[in-house]
Image (tube, rainbow, N blue to C red):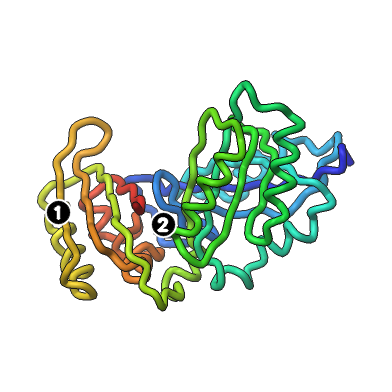
Amino acid sequence: MKNGKKIRFLELHNHYPDDYVDNINSVLGRYCAFGYHDAISISEVDEMTEDLGLWNKRSDIVSKKINGTSTMQVISVLFDVENEKKEQNFWNEENDEKYPYCFFTFIRVGESGKKEDIGAIIKEINWNFNCMAYYSFEHCEVLCVTRFDRYRLGIDKVKQICQKFSVCKSYTIVAVPEACLHMVNDSEKEIVNVVMKCNVKNHVKAENFLNYLEQILKSSNENIIFEKYDMVGQFDIMVLVKGVVMKDILPLYAMGRLMTHSNSSYSGAFYNIETSFI
């Protein structure tokens, strides 16, 4: 074993934007991700040994799961053996329904960040039952994962964590377990604004799709404000939906539902839609 470390792999999945294979309706990963990536999977833990063959291991993961319907990026992260039990409990699926909002924050530490300071901050973060911090082999030095029962509580925690490090750059992926998209416990009806950036395939179909989406959302809350803007650059249309209850929109992202590549109305109208919550 090397330095008392263990390793876990995170798999970031994307559907092909324009795909006609039969099994595109299969769930890509345990978590439905919002933004650029479509899904996230969590691998089993491995021993960090001298002969692990890191790149071979990553290649094996990709070759066993790629089936022509998606692409995959594999992220390798390390944690201390002393945190093994806590780390296993953190990813226990029994916690998914209780803490459905998961925040994957990739942190690149600035030049002023010292190795000793980074290690101390990681240990401090790992004292929290709903947080897990890792060292990373990727373009960032640290990956922090936090789980909450409320979206905005998670956003606040992400900001607190980033302030602890001398951050040069950070990027957060928000994800919800696929199995929980239909049953997020939201007795207080947490309200957010939703931003959707769209790459249009067919403008007529896109207009019909967005009109239908507006009808669905307003059937739960007629006070929702639905705004559409034309764009130039990477995206063609930006949609801003104000006053959305989270539990009303999340089911639309379950595999096969309206806001997924596997839905025929979606795939006929768009190459891609990236969603974020504000």
Element under disc 1: helix
- Residue 16 position by quadrant: top left
Can residue 210 be seen here? The reply is yes
| Circle 1: residue type | Lys
Q: Residue at x 66, y 52 (%)?
A: 132
Rendered view: 171 above or below 261: above
Q: Which mark, residue 179? A: none
The answer to whether residue 196 is left or right of residue 87 is left
In the displayed structure, would residue 158 be above or below residue 187? above
- Tell me if residue 31 comes above or below residue 121 in the rendering: below
Identify which residue, 169 or 162, lies in the foreground.
162
Q: State which mark lies toward you, 1 or 2.
A: 1
* Kind of element beneath mark 2: helix
Residue 166's quadrant in the figure?
A: top right
What whole-number distance in Å separates the C-alpha atoms at marks 1 and 2? 21 Å
Mark 1 or mark 2: whose residue is earlier in sequence = 2
Q: What is the three-letter code of the residue carrying label 2?
A: Ile
The residue wearing badge 2 is 24
Residue 278 percent across, percent down from the top left: 34, 52
Give the residue at mark 1.
Answer: 205
Q: Nearer the viewer, residue 6 or 223?
A: 223
Kindly identify the residue that appears in the image at 35 percent across and 49 percent down: 19
Q: Residues within 10 Å of mark 2 (few under 14, many from 20)?
A: many
In depth, the one of 87 and 153 nearer the eye is: 153
Residue shown at 36% from the left, 72% from the top: 189
